[in-house]
Image (cartoon, rainbow, N blue to C red):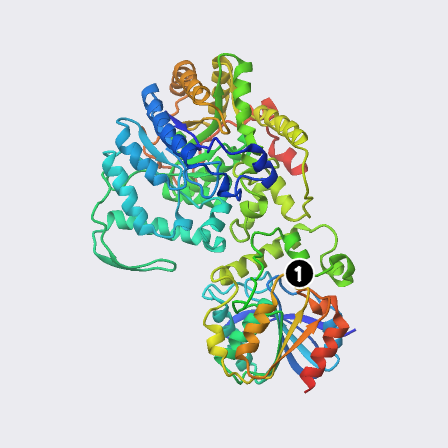
Amino acid sequence: MLIGYFTERPYRSVPEEEVFKNRSFFGLSNKFFDPVKGSEDYRYYIEEYRYAEELGFDLVALNEHHGNPFCLGSVMNVEAAVLAYATRRVRIVLIGNPLPVLKHPLRMAEELAEIDLISQGRLVTGWVRGAGSEQFFNNANPAYNRELFNEAHDFIVQAWTKPGPWRYEGEHFHYRHVNPWALPYQKPHPPIWIPGILSPETVRWCAEHRYPYIGLGTELGPTCDLWDIYAEEAARYGYQAGTENFGYLLPTVVGETDEQAQEVAKNFIFGGGQNAFALPEYAMPSGYNSKSAIRMLAKQPTGTWLGVSGDNLQRLSKDEARGAADYTEVKKKLAAGLERIEGRLQLIAGSPKTVLEKVKTVLRVLRPGVFIMFNVQGAASNEQRMGNMRLFAQEVMPGLREYGKEIGLLDAFQKAPGSTKLEAGAKRAPVNNREVLYDLGLYKRPEQRAQA
Amino acid sequence: MTAVIEETIKAAGADLAVVRGGSGKPLLILHDELGYTGWMTWNEELALDHTLLIPLQPGFSQTPRLTWVRTYRDLAGYYSQVVREMKLDPVDVIGFSAGGFIAAEMMAADPKIFAHAVLVAPMGVKPEQGEILDIFPLSIRNHLRATVADPEGTPEFGKIYGGELTPEQFEAFEDARSETSRLGWEPYMHNPSLPHLLRGNNTPTLLVWGNRDRVVPRGCIEAYRKVLGKAQVAEIDGAGHRPEIERPLDFVKIVGKFLAS
């Protein structure tokens, strides 16, 4: 089992009231960006990732968003390149490059190869379709998003593995001379893990390619459903999916006491938290989600990440009440929301003992080979952020490693995804333990859901 | 009431759903970027002396998507094949909004395809002043409301879009907006070469525009007028982007007179 560290690298000096006024992080005017503060944050986060290595994490994970104080990683590969040299041991996991919005897969193949070379083979590359707002920011046609993703993926893998020069005439991309000189350090290419939040199509595509799927803090019940979709598809392709096929990322806060952790966890609702990532009209542009994804989304009423939720889906078909909000009321609602999220184990905060037990429950349910801790958002201080990391690494991680061994959580480096063959027609083994959720009252059995 | 039928025909190598109703000379109707609204007052009035032919755009729920159609010019090429195959040309046409864009592309490629062209708040050209409203960062409801000057004072708007959206309606709008995004995302709902290819086109053309239109600015009308030799402009006072449902009787009067000319 691998344990990773992740942060969105929030811009910590954004005025919260301005985010509330804008009703989301995306779209907030860049007049509120202060380059000195921004520089401090960028440099601090590099140090923070080095600290994660020092503390014993196996992985450091980066992501990318555009035009958004929620996440400073607008050109993630720059940070990954810095980390490739500034760290020595950890694997650098990208979750991920938004291929359709960057629109230049040859350039992407070159950038990732350089990162893999500088890090001497520590890159784990991951690709995403990009949040809805990314399509607007980069003027990428959302209706072609999946086609662009699939084609860019196929192209990059070829660019890394098929000796050049060759010519490429695709549907969306065209290159007359493909021959990237610097090829990846790892052969045939760096491992590919795919992060996601809800799309059944992405999960099926991962299973087809035998790529591990990393659930990004999605609600446990629907995540079990996604795991099952993966495993069913894997069976169709003749293999048994296992812990090596799955990873899970979870907002986690450890304090000396439960109370102290709760205080720090409040930073997750700064400015409205993840549901305020972008307004629904930016989060879910037409053509970006398939009909089946929209239906899947409707099962997650209060949502997942990046403003993608059933509630926001509803808001798309209703008139929006506008006007000045009462921020005290808004904050009260957010605090109640935080409690609900914690109740569903989509965010875990507490003393080392509390966190260990709750994360063990998550591991028992989802059985992921990779667990990634997601540090707090908002304006938390360096001390609060590093305190969280230190307590997690020293007080929680050893117990998790032990538990991972006990319940047989193997990661994709210990066991190659897709290596357990499954005969045609043979019954596949379960890939999650959803009974635990039913017992905890965190998900309804399928028949109860059908009735509802 | 006119008998209105919807049928799927084989046209230019593909299935195409078409709504048909009325009697008299054929009148091709190209609906807007949100899709066919159903048979309204203006349809009923014009159907008294025209046979309305309303193709339902490929990719908009009833007609399967044509994957090779990637631009409005591609779509115009497909519709032109349909018109020729049905031996309709020269035919009268009314194109609404993005439908006006399609009609203008058809005219540019074949100046003799239309006997009369009515372009209602047409997209397709970069406006001389102002901008075409970006419909994609709008929720469906806000998009719909932006299409009329006074939603509450427009009875037919309530008839089409009143009440809560059903999941089926939501999906139909998603289909329409997705296909519109495929064809018109960039350059946004216009084609920079279109005005050049329309220069000197003598198709009798009526440009209709409501002076409270929040979607297509008057600048688009000016850009068309500049290049279309015989274009007339009819401005409908107080109407927004959908004069045909906001001022149906004025609309029918103006358009009927033009088509009879």
Q: Quadrant of the C terminus of chain A?
A: top right
Residue closest to the eye, A452 or A252: A252
Q: Quadrant of residue B249?
A: bottom right
Rendered view: B16 above or below B172:
below
Label 1 neighbour load within 10 Å: few <14, some 14-19, many 20+? many
Visible residue check, residue A420: no
Rendered view: A147 above or below A76:
below
Secondary structure under tag 1 reads loop
Residue closest to the eye, A165 or B136: B136
Rendered view: A110 above or below A391:
below
What amino acid is at disc 1? Thr
Visible residue check, residue B173: yes
> Left or right of A158: which side holds A391?
right
Q: Quadrant of the N terminus of chain A?
A: top left
Q: Quadrant of residue A81?
A: top left
Residue at image position (59%, 60%) is B61
> Left or right of B34: which side holds B237?
right
Residue found at the far bottom of this picture: B261
Rendered view: B245 above or below A314:
below
Residue at image position (35%, 27%) is A49
Query: Where is mark 1, residue-wise?
Result: B147
Of all chains, the one bearing label 1 is B
Q: Position of residue A312 (x, y in %)?
A: 61, 42
Residue closest to the eye, A364 or B105: B105
Q: Position of residue B93 (x, y in %)?
A: 62, 78
Q: Quadrant of residue B127?
A: bottom right
Q: Position of residue B160 (x, y in %)?
A: 72, 60
Q: How many marks?
A: 1
